[in-house]
Amino acid sequence: MRGSSPRMTRLCHLTQTPCGGVPHAHLNTMNTTRTMPLDDEFRPRRHTRASREAALERLDWLANLMDAALVIPGTRRTVGLDALVGLVPGIGDLATAAVSLYIVRQARELGAPRHLVLRMCGNVAVDAVFGAVPLVGDAFDVLWRANKRNMRLLRAHFDRVGLD
């Protein structure tokens, strides 16, 4: 008998909630917390010359802290937190890569072009991959200095195009 079987409710393939016959109509009532479209997330903000210079100074300070904050006694070689925190297996390299990516993100917000940001990401990737190798990676961190390299690239870009 046709009327005696229970009616099947269609479930949405995305949210596994009842659709009610209209595909994805229930998605219009979902609470969303984003107020900006995705495209605006990586669009550079408008900066003044002074704010851009101040941001570059902060990023220089952070790059120096990560790559050249301490002098090795008896030598002229410097090390930063990148090499020291990188001694902690696994999580140390993740933490230093996160700080390095913060510098790259700030460079994008300051208006660095995409090709420069990709080159900076390449420096961070080389640092993260080779830095993850036990012992050899820690020596590599002392020599590679991805954050200082990235700041040189960023400064050279703004020297060419200006801070305005």
Image (spheres, rainbow, N blue to C red):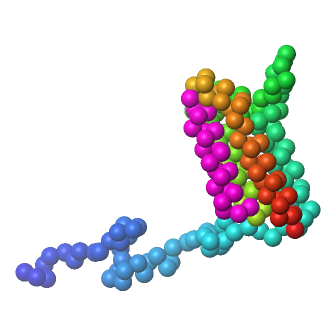
Say which quarter of the image contains residue 19: bottom left
The residue under the point 32% across, 82% down is: 21
Q: Left or right: where does residue 20 sit relative to residue 104?
A: left
- Front residue (pair 95, 76): 76
Quarter of the C terminus within the rendering: bottom right
Q: Which residues are magenta?
A: 112-133
> Would residue 129 be counted in the magenta stretch?
yes
When the figure is inspected, residue 82 is found, relative to residue 163, above or below; the finding is above
> Would residue 153 be counted in the magenta stretch?
no
When the figure is inspected, residue 119 is found, relative to residue 85, above or below; the finding is below
Magenta stretch: helix, strand or loop mostly:
helix
The residue under the point 46% across, 76% down is: 27
Q: Left or right: where does residue 21 sit relative to residue 117?
A: left
Q: Can you see residue 91?
A: no
Find the residue positioned furthest to the front.
160
Q: Can you see residue 7?
A: yes
Say which quarter of the image contains residue 92: top right
Find the residue positioned furthest to the top.
74
Residue 34, x across and y down, in percent:
62, 70
Residue 1, x across and y down, in percent:
7, 81
- Front residue (pair 20, 161): 161
Residue 161, x across and y down, in percent:
83, 64
The residue under the point 92% across, 62% down is: 50
- Front residue (pair 122, 23): 122
When the figure is inspected, residue 143 is found, relative to residue 16, above or below; the finding is above
Find the residue positioned furthest to the left.
1
- In the rendered picture of this protein, how many numbered marks are placed on residues? 0
The residue under the point 67% across, 26% down is: 139
